[in-house]
Image (cartoon, helix red, strand yellow):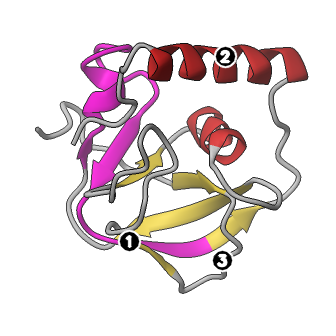
Amino acid sequence: MTSKAAPTGPYYHGAKADLAPGDLIAPGYPSNYGKRRIAAFVYLSETLEAATWGAELARGEGPGRIYIVEPTGPIEDDPNLTDKKFPGNPTRSYRSRYPLRIVGEIQGWVGHSHEQLQAMRDGVARAEALGIEAIQD
């Protein structure tokens, strides 16, 4: 599945991992979501909003981080969002089977309110309780 409008970047990735420019974010590690299966894809977005959710909802210790990344191979629309929640890809969210190279980090980004974050976490917990897997590979 390819993107209808060719994405141009810049691209962002939200995480809790402490990484540096030149590091790679690659598939093959447990997902931050759902049953934590080994991820076949890495995810990126052209919006800081989507990356902010990724940084805030990622599992792990430490602060959320938003990295500026460049794909090292082809990217495609993220079907977890575009097919199920936001037809047309307004979140400009993508995935790739190839690593993402970190080229920088966004400093001073502002997260969601406590109420917004709790509502999102509650929604994720309800979906998990119903057996709905967050990531469909």
Among numbered discs 3 and 2, the one appearing first in the sequence: 3
Whether residue 79 is in magenta: the answer is: yes
Question: What residue is rendered at 56% in x and 22% in y?
Answer: 124
As helix, strand or loop, the secondary structure at mark 2 comes to helix
Horizontal and vertical percent position of residue 26: 38, 71
Task: State the residue lying farthest toward the bottom.
Answer: 22
Task: Give the quarter of the figure containing the C terminus.
Answer: top left
Magenta residues (range): 76-103
Q: CA separation, marks 2 and 1?
A: 28 Å
Residue placed under numbered mark 1 in the picture: 26
Residue placed under numbered mark 3 in the picture: 19
User: Is 113 displayed left or right of 26 in the figure?
Assistant: right
Q: Please identify, in this view, whether the residue under mark 2 or under mark 1 is nearer the observer.
A: 2
Taking depth in this image into account, of 32 and 101 the one nearest to the observer is 32
User: Is 79 displayed left or right of 51 in the figure?
Assistant: left
Horizontal and vertical percent position of residue 4: 18, 31
Residue placed under numbered mark 2 in the picture: 122
